[in-house]
Amino acid sequence: MRTSRSGMFAVAVLCATLAACATGGGGAGTTQLSPADLSALEAQRAQHPTDPDVNLRLAKAYYSANRFADARKALALVLTQQPTNRIAQTYLGLSYEGMEQFDSARAIYSALLATKPSGEVGRLLNGRLTLLARKELHASARASLAHETELSRTPPDPNTVAVFPFRYTGQDSSLRPLERGLAALVVSDLSHVRRLRLVERERLQALLDEMRLAASGRVDPTTGARSGHLVGAGQVVQGQFQEAPGTNIRLDATMVRAGDAQVAATGSGRNPLNQLFDLEKSVVFQLLTKTGVPVSPAESIAISERPTKDLQAFLLYSRGLESQDKGDFRAASADFKAAAQRDPTFQAAAQQSQSSDAAQSASGTPDNTLAAIVGGGSVGPSSGPPAGTTQALQLGINTTVPSGATIVDQTGSGTPPSQQRPDPLCEAADCQGPVANPTVIGTIIIIIKRP
């Protein structure tokens, strides 16, 4: 087959790109660089200290080696030359995460989201923010425990309330997830009282995980008061529930002062299981009345609202919270989605379903792949063909079929070629654009006209 002179450049681009795919492209998380490889990249940077491509490759290598501060410095040089380089921006956010500078990482991801990216990119970035919040909560909990002595000297705000997971003491294991669901419901109800400030359920759960109290279920007034101090809460709600004779369920709760570990108020009741929400509302109002917290008519109406009319939907939602706390976002997403399907008006379930689904996608996406997807092939100016030429060539290569050949259905689904999505060239971190991770199985010669 003859090759036109104008097509030679396209063949060269194709071969170079396929070679990058075969070697993994050198992206962070793709290959494990040896010290010699890293030294070679540092030597290149020494010769070309401001070259953005060299600095980006070095930053990826530093990130892969967990040298996050060095990666940040190299990325700063890249972004000085190419401020809109989204691959570099993504790696900068990841490097800040590695350094536990969570505010800076959040600012990077939020700025990327502010550009209103495509659905998949937006979902991955939102998921990364969810994972980031989880990391931040656990880091904060560890810091609080490390400085517990100093924190104990500061009186907590008496109007700040933390709600522990309710403890299930019955025999029906299918009801156990209500430990989380009831706590979330109490937090939601008390948050309607303007005078009170509520500690986020996830923040307290992170602390309990670090204290290892959640697994044992051992929460007494003393440990409750201690936890309250650590999260800055002056009041702590603790409770338990179990089956009662007949089809009833019994719910008990106490409000403990963190300052002296004394019980400030109690609430209890017994109702049929299908009237669980009525029971929970009754206990909440008892606690508010006995602690002397004034509740306006509007606040009372808001507290009385039910999150859903379907008890099974609420149980599925509670299971989702349990899986979420364990970091199992796939199971959490499935339970939240099932809850929302049972009751389309259950807004909390729908919101949590989206959040967990995004977190699952982000947690299952390698960092180098995340950067490539977010980058979307836009890395700023670089040496090479004139602007627009490489993109046009890539499109031509991806959509050109040699005479006598057919488009390979890489999905194995038998989809007709006319309905298939043109697959880009590779998934290596250094390749630009969407990714497909093909495998080189032979020699390809393509003749196309140069744009």
Image (cartoon, rainbow, N blue to C red):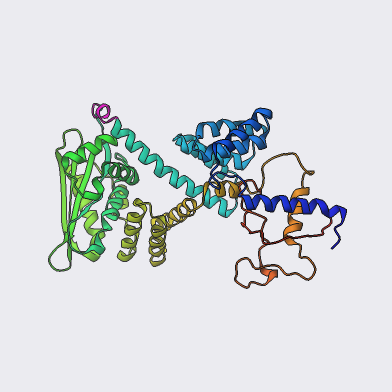
In this view, the residue farthest toward the front is 36
**Quarter placement of the N terminus:** bottom right
For the point 34% across and 54% down, the residue is: 321
Q: Is residue 82 left or right of residue 132?
A: right
Task: Please provide the residue range marked out in magenta.
Answer: 147-153
Q: Position of residue 249 (x, y in %)?
A: 18, 62
Q: Is residue 195 left or right of residue 98?
A: left
What secondary structure is the magenta-colored segment mainly? helix
Is there any visible trace of residue 250 in the rendered image? Answer: no
Against 109, residue 14 (above or below) is: below
Against 211, residue 51 (above or below) is: above
Toward which corner of the image does residue 380 lie, by quadrant?
top right
Is there any visible trace of residue 266 in the rendered image? Answer: yes
Q: Is residue 171 left or right of residue 310?
A: left
Q: Position of residue 91 (x, y in %)?
A: 55, 40
For the point 14% across and 63% down, the residue is: 244
Against 217, residue 85 (above or below) is: above
Q: Position of residue 270 (x, y in %)?
A: 16, 60
Q: Nearer the viewer, residue 64 or 338?
A: 64
Residue 352 inside the magenta-drawn segment: no
Q: Position of residue 153 (x, y in %)?
A: 23, 26
